[in-house]
Image (cartoon, grey):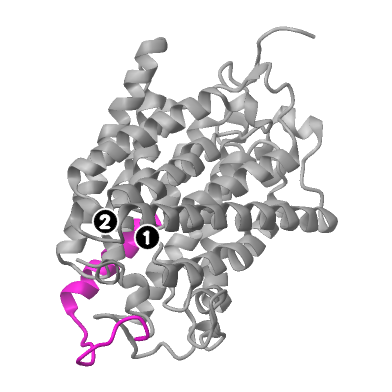
Amino acid sequence: MTHKTLLPLAALLGGTALAQTAPPTLDSGDTAWMLMSAALVLLMTPGLAFFYGGLTRAQSVLNTMMMSVVSIGLVGVLWMLAGYTLAFGEGGNALIGGLSHLGLEGLAGQLTGTVPTYVFAAFQAMFAIIAVALISGAVVERMRFGAFVTFGALWSLLIYAPLAHWVWSADGWLFKDGALDFAGGTVIHISAGVSALVAARVLGPRLGYPRAAHVPHNVPLVLLGAGLLWFGWMGFNAGSALAAGQTAALAFITTLVAPAAAMLTWLAWEARQGKPTAVGAATGAVVGLVAITPACAFVSPWAALLIGVLGASASYWTLNLKTHLRADDTLDVFACHGVAGIVGALLTGALAWTTGSGKAVPEQLLTQAVSVVASLLYAGMGSFVLLKLVNVLTPLRVTATQELTGMDLHAHREQGYSQPETELGAPVFLGGD
């Protein structure tokens, strides 16, 4: 099994990566699976809204959830207008796609592999949507809603789309170099994780941080969100096979094993330091999902278990050292997505031999390291520039009064609850002046 046969996202796009002996034909079974997978991935963003919303204060739950929800509308339109063609348009170069499919022009009646290209474009749109939504977790409770929307629009077109082209397009330089990223560890999780860390640093910490402990206001919402994310992630990973076959089957089983192992690992670490928690179980599962994403169709089930254990351990201890990052990443996006994404990308290179894919281990590890560094540098520096640009157009941060009273009424003139000022919803100061 070769790298190119395992990575149809890029190989099936332009015909330049794989010589085909016969024209592809539409397969109704594959098409049905991809339609379902796209719907599953779309569900992940509302799932993320529940997950993030439960972790915040009651006074900001709606604003937190709205940052995820608005990403569906915002990126859904931008992907149609320009995002898809910048990522996958023919006639591009190693860095960016061509402009032949602005407004999704020229896709009618076309196939990507055995499915309509419209279906492939919709499936990829769901990836672009959740990538923007993930970043919001680092800036909730203090970033202006309009500023986030503006940044999200620019980030989607200028950061996400080029990275998707580098890794998944047959013309992309990382694809040509042999980088393995089956479903978005580099493109989505590393880029969103480092962008979130940069955004948290640019905005500055929440009022009272780190003395004020902003505890989750609704743990059942966190568990609901994690469950929806795991459910949708099956389509996220297995759907990236673009067909209902053996590759999708492998991705599906590894997407079960890795997060299960990661959840148990996270709970074990918590038990050593105190008590296992529901938030820990949910977080561990999500971290395992992140870690297995780049590797899900390149490694065996036992290797997936190892990825889950190591990914969860790395994220857990990064989170415990959070204050050393010198940035108030509100919901630990970098620790859970950036770090787990890095671990997953590197372990993909180390363990791809378990299914006979990829290059020799040392060479593949070097290729994976290059892709990780490229994603970190491009997304990190690019996000810094975009945030500074947005700050010229509109202030990034709400006032101190608005932050203390909560974001919901200020940003949306709505409340998540009839009495949002609950004991658990308010900051708990740990001491000092």
In the rendered image, residue 159 lying in the magenta stretch gets the answer no
Residue 306 percent coordinates (x, y): 27, 37
Foreground residue, 314 or 129? Answer: 314
- Where residue 393 sits, quadrant-wise, is bottom right
What is the three-letter code of the residue carrying label 1?
Leu
Q: In which quadrant is the C terminus drawn?
A: top right
- Determine whether label 1 and label 2 are within 8 Å by CB: yes
**Which is nearer the N-term, disc 1 or disc 2?**
1
In the rendered image, residue 24 lying in the magenta stretch gets the answer yes
Mark 1 and mark 2: span between their CA atoms? 8 Å
- Where residue 238 sits, quadrant-wise, is bottom left
* Relative vertical location of residue 262 with respect to residue 414 in this rendering, above or below: above
Please tell me how many numbered marks the rendered image carries. Answer: 2
Instruction: Return the mark for residue 298.
Output: 2
Can see residue 12? yes
Residue 217 percent coordinates (x, y): 52, 25
Report the residue marked by disc 1. Answer: 180
* Relative vertical location of residue 133 with respect to residue 8 in this rendering, above or below: above
Can see residue 293? no
* Relative vertical location of residue 404 with respect to residue 336 in this rendering, above or below: above
Stretch of the chain drawn in magenta: 15-43
